[in-house]
Amino acid sequence: MSAKSGYTRPRPLAGAEHSSPPPPSPVLYVANCGPAVGLTHADIRGAFDAFGEVAGVHNADDSGARVIVRFREPAAAEAAMAALHGRPCGRLAGRVLHIRYSVPVKPKARAGGPVPVALTAAELGVPGIYMVPEFVTAAEEQELLAAVDSRPWKSLAKRRVQHYGYEFLYETKNVDSKQCLGELPTFVSMILEKLMSFPGVKKYTTKLVDQLTVNEYPCGVGLSPHIDTHSAFDEMIFSLSLAGPCIMEFRKYPKGSWRAPSVVNGDDEDSTQETEYIRKAIYLPPRSMLLMSGEGRYAWHHYIPHHKIDNVGGQVIKRNSRRVSFTFRKVRMGPCECEYKQFCDSQSKMP
């Protein structure tokens, strides 16, 4: 939604096959239009001014590709919609605009809005979360990307993946511990060595990690809120970010469980059916390594918003490139006996 404009995209009523469109108003919701597609608010104002005085142009959401255009008079909005909806706009680089009358934002039951974004794990303040920037060099980053790009990818709905050591089974959100794919590839050997001295790492008598999932996220694609299944993996989970940045949000649901919270309308933040939870966020720059352990791994859902533009400390950061993550984990060979029973699938199955 657009907090500044007070207007948002009209949604059809739940269960209504032919819901009535919102009545004409001076406020338009315009898709395929905004900073993420190379159009400034000044450009947009200039194009819509041809139909009447424009009172304001605001981002409709965090995507950067949808805006709210507010006219002084309803007739101007009506004329703009009639002329531009579904047609190329010459003054806006020939983009085909998709326009609807906007509706006022309904107040939420809980305080929403953007969450402050931490730049360090200490600032984040989630127990068990550690982050080291520049964990690998720019040259090492390119070597790692070249190594995975030379190997076959498996396509999922919105991203591509590779698995090493053990394959992660998305249907069950678990692994088959009896089906080992072999040792981790040699191109991550230097990473495994550096992990032994990573902040927060506990001493292990066996291998620290034995499973690697490589994820390739296209520009703007994120990850739904989830806790890595307790019964599948041990306590420490490492995630190396390459090629592009992202914001990772951590959410603690006091009334939640190990299952992912319900999401309505397939949307992002502020759309879960849970009305009370704690939100914290951290910026993960390229080449940074994140460790989730203890409470942060076992009791907090982690989530990457589906944004093409992130706001970090007042600075706009565009996700102009893909993001590739290397997630290292240790496959658990028995039930989890952690202290976070509310979020533990192993212990929730026990009588």
Image (cartoon, rainbow, N blue to C red):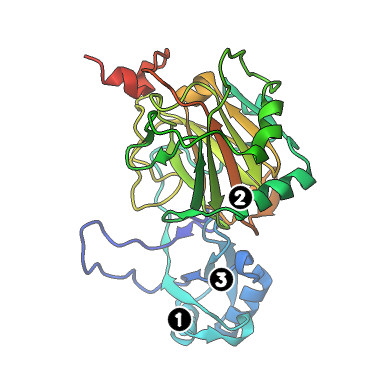
Mark-to-mark CA distance, 2 and 1: 43 Å
State the residue at coordinates (66%, 29%): 192
Furthest residue to the front? 182
Q: Nearer the viewer, mark 2 or mark 1?
A: 2
Mark-to-mark CA distance, 1 and 3: 12 Å
Left or right position of 20 against 67:
left
State the residue at coordinates (65%, 79%): 46
Camera-nearest residue between 167 and 77: 167
Q: Amino acid at mark 3?
A: Cys
Q: Secondary structure at mark 3?
A: loop
Q: Earlier in the sequence, mark 2 or mark 3?
A: 3
Q: In the drawing, what numbered circle is on residue 148? A: 2
Q: In the drawing, what numbered circle is on residue 216? A: none
Q: Earlier in the sequence, mark 1 or mark 3?
A: 3
- Rendered position, 46 above or below 342: below
Q: Amino acid at mark 2?
A: Val
Q: In the drawing, what numbered circle is on residue 33? A: 3
Q: Percent position (x, y) of residue 88?
A: 53, 85
Q: Percent position (x, y) of residue 324?
A: 60, 48
Left or right position of 69 against 186:
left
The reply to whether callout 2 and callout 3 are in contact (CB within 8 Å) is no
Q: Quadrant of residue 282?
A: top right
State the residue at coordinates (42%, 14%): 338
Label 2: how many residues lie within 10 Å, few (<14), some (14-19) or many (20+)?
Answer: some
- Rendered position, 30 above or below 8: below
Q: Amino acid at mark 1?
A: His
Specify the quadrant that holds the C terminus.
top left
Question: Which residue position is annotated with label 1?
Answer: 85
> Is residue 12 shown to the viewer in this render?
yes
Label 3: how many residues lie within 10 Å, few (<14), some (14-19) or many (20+)?
Answer: many
